Amino acid sequence: MHKSKQWLTVIFRWFVAIGLLVFILNKTDSDLLWQTLRGFNPAFGLLLVVCHIAVLMLMAYRWRLIAQQFNVEAAYTDYLKAIWIGALSGQIGPPLIFSEVARFKVLQDYGDNQSLIGSQVLDRLSGLVALVFILLLALPLNWPLFAEMIPVATLLQSLAIAAISGVVLFRVVFSTKIRVLMDRNKISDVMSLGQSHYELSSLIQLLLMLGFLLAAYGLGAPKLPFTLFTLLPLIFVGLTLLPISISDWGTREIFAVYVLSFAGLPAEESAAISIIYGFSYSLTTLLGLFFLLKK
């Protein structure tokens, strides 16, 4: 019964991803979109793959820093193997399920289940904290753009609701997921400010944003590169809040078309940037087959 429900979830998310991609194709000029994609410079594609590899390597190092504080002792190569196999698994199913289960399976012999699962949750949370921090830093830069599209009062109300919801969600997660697994004081120590994993998380988020920028430059110099870069945290926040498709296909393109319009990019170019970014990431995760076959 549990497996049937899990596979129904996978099938549903595939339908969501395909449906959203079809929606994007119907709302854009398909000929212009494919023409834009064909004009992509392969040299930037290579840089994109290098950028994705760097992200996966840093993610493995961050997870190792956190997991070591819970006595999960494994070599860096084992963490890298787990991260890469997890990323590969996330290409066929919901990342929060397939990816995390794959990561757990690879390292399950290196620590007790509670510590390992807890380290995975805190690893995810570290990335979320860094993303919110970068979003808040970029928000003043983009405030005039938002004010043109959304009344200031509505924007302030939305931010207040989001902040309150975030605090409530944070409390719920800690109450139901982590605090039952590990000592509260240990969690506070790991997630306290000044921990080096936050620096790694910030660097990872900046590299993810750089990947979008490289995809944009591969299609030609964008009109407002700085504005485009400062808007990218909104896309990643949206993907974090709505993990409803497979490997973010479809949802990423929807967010990209809407958010990047603030930087003056046409829908076809925004969709092409997102598709190139997603394809290069999927291509990078295929290298996880090497680790999977060895495992």
Image (cartoon, rainbow, N blue to C red):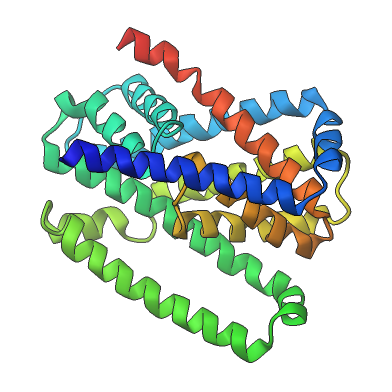
Q: Residue at x 24, y 43 (%)?
A: 5
Please tell me in which quadrant of the rendered image residue 177 appears: bottom left
Q: How many marks?
A: 0
Please tell me in which quadrant of the rendered image residue 228 appears: bottom right
Q: Position of residue 139 (x, y in %)?
A: 64, 71
As rendered, which of 208 and 220 lies closer to the eye?
220
Please tell me in which quadrant of the rendered image residue 34 appears: top right
Judge from the rendering whether residue 205 lies leftward or rightward of residue 46; answer left or right.
Answer: left
Inspect this view and state whether residue 206 appears. no
* 7 lies above or below 85: below
* 154 lies above or below 8: below
* 270 lies above or below 154: above
Q: Position of residue 283 (x, y in %)?
A: 58, 24
As rendered, which of 169 and 187 lies closer to the eye?
169
Q: Residue at x 53, y 35 (%)?
A: 55
Question: The C terminus appears in which quarter of the rendering?
Answer: top left
Question: The N terminus appears in which quarter of the rendering?
Answer: top left
Q: Position of residue 151 (x, y in %)?
A: 69, 87
Q: Position of residue 229 (x, y in %)?
A: 72, 54
Inspect this view and state whether residue 39 appears. yes
Q: Residue at x 14, y 31 (%)?
A: 111
Judge from the rendering whether residue 136 lies leftward or rightward of residue 288; answer left or right.
Answer: right
As rendered, which of 244 and 161 lies closer to the eye?
244
- List the single residue furthest toward the bottom: 153
Judge from the rendering whether residue 137 lies leftward or rightward of residue 170; answer left or right.
Answer: right
Q: Residue at x 37, y 39 (%)?
A: 10
* 123 lies above or below 283: below
Judge from the rendering whether residue 284 lies leftward or rightward of residue 116; answer left or right.
Answer: right
